[in-house]
Image (spheres, rainbow, N blue to C red):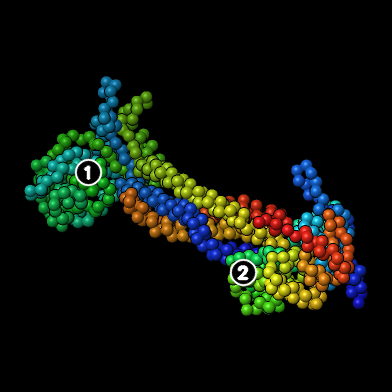
Amino acid sequence: MSYVEALRLALRRLRTNALRTGLTSLGVIIGVASLVALIGVGEGTQTALTKQIAGLGTNLLSVNAGGSLVGGIRGAAGSSSTLSLTDATAIAALPGVLAVAPEMAVPNVVIVSGRANTTTSMTGTTPAEQTVRAYEIQTGSFISDLAVAKGLRVAVLGPTTVTNLNLTPAEVVGSTVTIDGIPFTVIGVTQPKGGSGFSNPDDVVFTPISAVQSRFTGASSLRTVGVSVADPNNIAYVTSEIQATLRLRHALASTASDDFTMVSQNQLLSVASSTTATIRNFLIGIAAIALVVGGIGIANTMLVSVRERVREIGTRKAIGARRRDIGRQFLVEAVIVTLGGAVVGVLLGMAVTGPVGSAVSVPAVPTLGGIALAFGSALVVGIVAGYLPARQASRLDPVEALRYE
Amino acid sequence: MVADQSAAQVPLLEGRGLTRIYRMGDTEVAALRGVDFRIDLGENVAIIGPSGSGKSTLLHILGLLDRQSAGQYLFAGVDTDTLDDDRLAVLRNRAIGFIFQSFNLVSGESALENVASPLVYAGVKRRERLDRAQESLVRVGLGDRLHHDPSQLSGGQRQRVAIARALVTRPALILADEPTGNLDSHSSAEVFALLEQLQDQGLTLVTITHDQRIANRAQRILRVEDGSLIDGNAGDSSYLDHAEQGVS
């Protein structure tokens, strides 16, 4: 008997037992749907996180001032004052470096515009900041070289900061705000990057580094130097170059530890990726359990079905069915129930991926890979679930089977 | 003519010292004890005997559903011991049509599909299968019941569907196991008439029966008693009464 005949026979049988077929495949439907949905949510999480980290900059390498070591006691990160503007200039001269943005941070400044005010953190920087931290301008312009050279009191605000001041970007550009009492002219507003919480990239104010130096800190030490590496494959090399340069410039003895730290965007990405991969695999595992339970249900129903159809099997053997014909009939039946369940499960999974994602605030979409995996697993489950009943049916002795009541 | 002569020389079925022993735990039960017979092409043979005499065992071996424990069974001159299970299945499919006491139709499949099912295993294409099945159903007088489910048919009609299924492969041999055993007298007559018709058409027919009419029609009666075979004449039905008593 060909597989086409076995298929025809199976479909006829399953149609006459529609309710049982439906209930049997329910386990597979749920298993496949959860696989599709959870893989979609997992991928969505990964994509969102990757996008967020990619939004931090362009092949970003962040050089941070380390904790100072005073009398054997290490201070907080950034307490060291050894990272300087000339360090930034030296890094900019290294091969493979695309752009360097020295960053002088002033946390918790109060910005006042008319009667509204907000508190945010200020970053004194150079035009390179735009490249290094991947900021786009929606209205106006970013800080210019001229503004940095002259120490102009101009400011670029983040969109959240603008909203906090009860203004629109169009209104705020060209207006004057005070930052900790010092008047600044707003020359631009950045595009929203998305993100929230502790360090919202949209709640910021950028000013020329020279203005911050002269008006606020009075010092020349930097908190951070943002470095954009030209070729992402080159990050390890550039990292070691920067390390060697800074150690030399800071005159560190060979036994001394670095007085700075470096974090690359790729490191952040790989840490985040491995975390989300763990979560995703966990979710897939749960869904796979559901699918396996569905498979057990199918195996069970098929075993009952073999028992019910002993006489039919005996009759089929009498009229010329070989062992493999009988085996094929039951195996195909199990696989059809499973694949039918898988098709419904995929559709259901695709339908619920979005809602499930939004329930956990992740932009989830069903992925082709997820669908393929779910479908493939279901096929394997069907074959495994059908194998034992099929073998049992094919091995029945025809005389015994015909005598069976 | 040469082919006819050789066909006449080789019986369709031949048993030499057929023995079938069942093991039940430690005890051995002999269902057949060294049975010899030959049945030629076109013969009409009735097998009679009381329940438990071994006639069903004999029919199963004749139908290649079971194998003897000792002795030799030749099917169209071929020693069946040389054939594996798959070959036996193919032989059952091509050369034998079975008629069972309880019809053994598959419910959920129409009369037409039931009749066509042996052709599925013969690898016949669907269109031809359905044509031949229809032809076969017309032959048993059920041309107007093609798409009925077995559950919608009377007992006699079901048995006629089963006969159509046995005929559809145009087998050399029809094996019937109490074909009228589950039927009321009216249906029984209906099936009996059909079997008579088949006999007239020259089919080789081996029937296990308690039905005196069928036995009377047979050219030869093989009486099985306690695992042994007694070849009897068609006219001699004196032991039929004895056989009837075996029915419980």
Q: Amino acid at mark 1?
A: Thr
Please provide percent x and percent y for residue A3: 63, 63
Please provide percent x and percent y for residue B52: 78, 55
Q: Nearer the viewer, mark 2 or mark 1?
A: 2
Q: Mark 2: give few (<14), some (14-19) or many (20+) Cα within 10 Å.
A: many
Whether residue A214 is visible: no
- The quadrant of the image that shows the N terminus of chain A is bottom right
Q: CA distance from mark 2 to mark 1?
A: 89 Å
State the residue at coordinates (72%, 68%). B180
Please provide percent x and percent y for residue A310: 65, 57
Label 2, secondary structure: give it.
helix
In the picture of the structure, the residue carrying the numbered disc 2 is B150
State the residue at coordinates (28%, 40%). A225
Residue occupying the far top of the picture: A71
What chain letter is assigned to the residue under label 1?
A
A259 or A26: nearer the eye?
Answer: A26
Any mark on residue A125, and which?
Answer: 1
